[in-house]
Image (cartoon, rainbow, N blue to C red):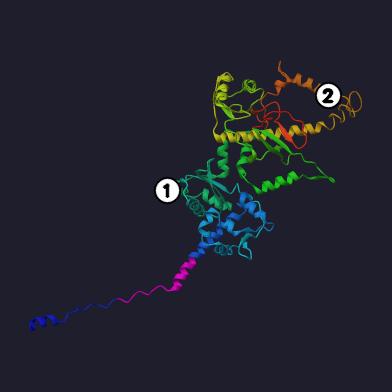
């Protein structure tokens, strides 16, 4: 190797001077991470606790059949945390385990967890909410349902005040109707929401809002309901649909009966034969018969709607042809005088051939050409419930009259055949004469050539209002009872504009 080459090899490497490197940033300590995680976990636990508190709240527990069954199954009202944690809206919390959920619930001042950490219950007794209807509002204009919409709705309405429940309204197929009923905990929150300026919006679009009471009034007006029908509709809309523990407990107390002296009054179970089903008839505080709405079967296609009658109806034009068509089975007719349409209920679902036959049989009503069609499913369901309630009232009334006829003036009783005042002797011997006299008076009160039977076919006005009525059949519906109760056969009942 030459000296020149050696010099090239041994030439030192030049290193450029640089600025000192910045000191490394201080690393997060484990204490900081634990504190952040702790705050996040605490908020998450609080959300889990609030969700379970909702399940046990007065506004939900007595109206949720599953929760009420769970609550009453144990005499001390303990409910398994594992069961509550399995609910759909608890899944994000239950993923952390039952012990974690139990720890979250121990924060509550409304609930308590047992010593084993596996059960939970309310601390206070269940109370029936007061003024829930008045504290509720209606709002419409929300988007179609997606998994997080319920949570978003609750957060939205909580901006206006504390809420007991945000209920997404659904149709018969369980599809969200893009509207809600919201129950606030106080009237101040209701006022704040309804008087908000600017009006509440969702995704930039103004919502249609009103009190639940105003919503009910709007629907009653849309349906053209008046008199007792409007009153009944308002009552139905103001009550909780579906299960109601308070209503069930009240019925149980009524069905047990009250003691009369040293003897309990004997109760009869009376059943209504309605559209192929047997429904138990109950008695309300005023002694009127009714059936539970959930017991009424929905028989699609057993109702027809007529349009174009010109504001009046002659019952015979509808009833007689249908009776002849169906071997004496009279229809249940709902019509309010002044309206241009009405509903006709049959004892079964109609076939296409039978519908076509009705259209041919009754082409005109009140000298006006009418059209026949199937009502909407909602119209038909509401109508069938009204039919059943009218039938129950008439059936219980008929049963009471039959029971009373076995007493004074009945067979074997005072004024009856073979008892005191039987034929021609004893007190009440003129019982039969009085009946004949009554019949004669009825005939005298009848206008023209109309007979007593025809008189019963006039429009019934159950609420005393003018030109309001619903027609039924001459005979009450068929009944079944644990005792032999004398009744007639038939589907419809004395009518009512309910």
Relative horizontal placement of residue 115, taking residue 203 as reference (left or right): right
Q: Secondary structure at mark 2?
A: helix
Q: Earlier in the sequence, mark 2 or mark 1?
A: 1
Residue occupying the far front of the picture: 1
Residue 148, image x and y in percent? 47, 52
Which quadrant: the N terminus?
A: bottom left
Query: How far from the left and from the top, in percent, is residue 299?
Result: 60, 34
Q: In the rendered image, which quarter contains the C terminus?
A: top right
Magenta includes 183? no
Closer to the camera in the image, 474 or 237: 474
Outermost residue, bottom side: 3
Q: Single out the mark in the foreground, 2 or 1.
A: 2
CA separation, marks 2 and 1?
76 Å
Magenta residue span: 22-39
The residue identified by callout 2 is 434
**Magenta-colored stretch includes residue 33:** yes
**Residue position for label 1:** 204
Report x, y in % for residue 3. 8, 84
Question: Is label 2 in contact with label 1 (beta carbons under 8 Å)?
Answer: no
Which residue ends up furthest to the top in the rendered image? 449
Q: Residues within 10 Å of mark 1 (few under 14, many from 20)?
A: few
Asked if 454 appears above or below 496 in the picture, the reply is above
Res 131 visible: no
């Amino acid at each position: 190797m030459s000296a020149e080459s050696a010099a090239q090899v041994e030439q030192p490497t030049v290193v450029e001077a640089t600025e000192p490197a910045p000191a490394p940033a201080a690393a997060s300590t484990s204490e900081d991470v634990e504190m952040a995680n702790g705050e996040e976990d605490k908020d998450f636990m609080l959300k889990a606790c609030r969700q379970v508190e909702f399940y046990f709240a007065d506004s939900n527990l007595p109206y949720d059949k599953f929760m009420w069954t769970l609550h009453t199954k144990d005499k001390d009202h303990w409910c398994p945390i594992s069961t509550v944690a399995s609910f759909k809206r608890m899944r994000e919390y239950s993923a952390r385990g039952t012990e974690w959920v139990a720890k979250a619930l121990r924060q509550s001042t409304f609930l308590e967890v047992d010593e084993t950490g596996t059960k939970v219950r309310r601390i206070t007794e269940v109370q029936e909410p007061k003024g829930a209807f008045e504290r509720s509002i209606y709002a419409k204009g929300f988007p179609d349902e997606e998994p997080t919409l319920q949570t978003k709705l609750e957060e939205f309405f909580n901006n206006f005040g504390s809420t007991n429940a945000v209920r997404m309204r659904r149709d018969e197929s369980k599809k969200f109707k893009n509207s809600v009923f919201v129950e606030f905990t106080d009237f101040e929150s209701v006022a704040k929401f309804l008087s908000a300026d600017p009006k509440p919006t969702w995704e930039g679009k103004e919502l249609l809002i009103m009190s639940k009471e105003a919503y009910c009034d709007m629907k009653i007006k849309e349906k053209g309901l008046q008199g007792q029908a409007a009153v009944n509709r308002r009552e139905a809309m103001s009550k909780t649909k579906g299960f109601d523990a308070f209503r069930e407990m009240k019925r149980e107390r009524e069905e047990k009966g009250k003691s009369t002296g040293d003897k309990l009054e004997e109760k009869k179970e009376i059943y209504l034969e309605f559209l192929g089903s047997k429904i138990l008839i109950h008695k309300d505080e005023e002694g009127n018969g009714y059936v539970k709405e959930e017991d009424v079967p929905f028989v699609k296609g057993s109702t027809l709607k007529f349009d174009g009658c010109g504001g009046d109806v002659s019952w015979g034009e509808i009833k007689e042809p249908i009776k002849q068509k169906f071997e004496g089975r009279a229809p249940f007719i709902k019509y309010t005088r002044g309206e241009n349409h009405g509903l006709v209920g049959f004892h079964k679902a109609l076939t296409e051939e039978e519908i076509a036959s009705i259209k041919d049989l009754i082409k005109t009503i009140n000298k006006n050409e009418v059209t026949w069609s199937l009502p909407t499913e909602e119209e038909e369901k509401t109508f069938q419930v009204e039919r059943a309630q009218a039938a129950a009232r008439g059936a219980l009334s008929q049963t009471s009259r039959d029971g009373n006829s076995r007493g004074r003036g009945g067979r074997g009783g005072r004024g009856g055949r073979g008892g005191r005042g039987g034929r021609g002797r004893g007190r009440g011997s003129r019982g039969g004469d009085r009946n004949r006299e009554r019949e004669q008076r009825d005939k005298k009160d009848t206008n023209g050539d109309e007979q007593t039977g025809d008189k019963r076919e006039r429009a019934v006005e159950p609420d005393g209002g003018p030109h309001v009525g619903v027609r039924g059949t001459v005979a009450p519906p068929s009944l079944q009872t644990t005792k032999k109760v004398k009744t007639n056969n038939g589907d419809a009942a004395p009518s009512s504009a309910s």
